[in-house]
Amino acid sequence: MSALDDELLDLFRFAAERSILPRWQNLRSDQIEEKAKGDLVTVVDQEVEEFLSEALTKLQPGVAIVGEEAAHSDPSVLEQLSGPCWIIDPIDGTSNFARGEGHFAIMLALADGGETIASWIYDPVRPRLLTARKGGGAFRDGDPVKASSDGETPPTLSAMTKFMNDEQRALFVAEIVPHYTLATAPGAAAEEYPRVAFGGTDIAIYERTLPWDHAAGCLFLNEAGGVCARQDGSPYRVDSDRKGMIAAASQGLWDEFVARLETLGFRPGG
């Protein structure tokens, strides 16, 4: 791993040991709030984001910080996404974390000019560090990785249909789902992108594409040899407010899935 990877891993481990693991399966009800319906935040999200924001500012003083919780409190933070910036999701999979079950992780991306140039996904329970560099490949704990499909017929599909409107959902369930084996969404992009890369899910479709949820995972999958892109094939940009994204373990799987959507006139995020 690079010197930067080592420095960040030390920060992730410290945050996990100080804030995350002591409260995992040990949160009090007064330490959990609902930012919006079904969208939780815990004291741990806030602590970890504050810690990482301060540490990253010291590490690279000229790089802006765009944290999920900071952006929720002050949407003007998002204006920094077009320049050099760190994008922090202090706990991706907060609902899983708050319930004390399922997967969650710290997600961090480094972006410039609206493009993700490096990413880190740290799972403190396994523990596991996934890293990627634009044009430089994807790695698991320092070892290079390559995406591969499950090889199952039909392929496995994960879809967050709850974010689709009623008409979209009905069309998707009736016309797309029967061609695939439907997988249970893990409730965390930090887990779903690795599943697409390593097996367990062949294809994932997303409606919401918020930068803290997707910047790190999208780069990781693409650098591993999978495909993560908008339905029209254009790359994901962290400074875009477009919705809809499709991830697949291979170009062939991505092309076949998109062709089915196009035939129906279906647009994720539309």
Image (cartoon, rainbow, N blue to C red):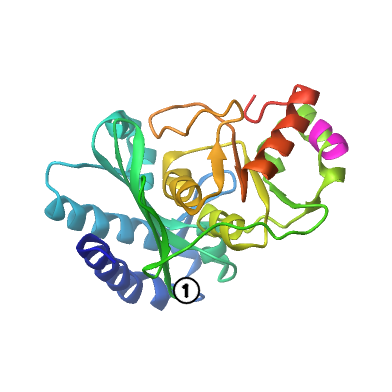
Residue 121 inside the magenta-drawn segment: no
- Return the residue nearer the eye: 192 or 53: 192
Q: Which residue bears the numbered disc 1?
A: 24
Q: Residue at x 67, y 62 (%)?
A: 200
Report the amino acid beneath label 1: Trp
Q: Is residue 215 left or right of residue 95?
A: left
- Return the residue nearer the eye: 136 or 166: 136
Q: Residue at x 78, y 32 (%)?
A: 260
Residue 173 inside the magenta-drawn segment: yes
Q: Residue at x 87, y 44 (%)?
A: 178
Q: Quadrant of the C terminus?
A: top right
How busy is the neighbourhood of tag 1: few (under 14 within 10 Å), some, or many (20 plus)?
some
Estimate the x, y position of residue 141 in percent, counting from the top left.
Answer: 39, 70
Would you identify the image quadrant in which residue 54 lies?
bottom left
266 relative to 17, above or below: above
Q: Residue at x 52, y 59 (%)?
A: 146
Q: Residue furthest top?
A: 265
Estimate the x, y position of residue 60 in percent, counting from the top left.
Answer: 14, 49
Q: Quadrant of the N terminus?
A: bottom left
How many marks are shown on the rendered structure? 1
13 relative to 89, above or below: below
Q: Which residues are magenta?
A: 171-175
Magenta stretch: helix, strand or loop mostly:
helix
- Return the residue nearer the eye: 169 or 231: 231
227 relative to 199, above or below: above
Q: Secondary structure at mark 1?
A: loop
Q: Is residue 125 left or right of residue 109?
A: right
93 relative to 261, above or below: below
Estimate the x, y position of residue 59 in percent, counting from the top left.
Answer: 14, 55
Estimate the x, y position of residue 100 in percent, counting from the top left.
Answer: 55, 71
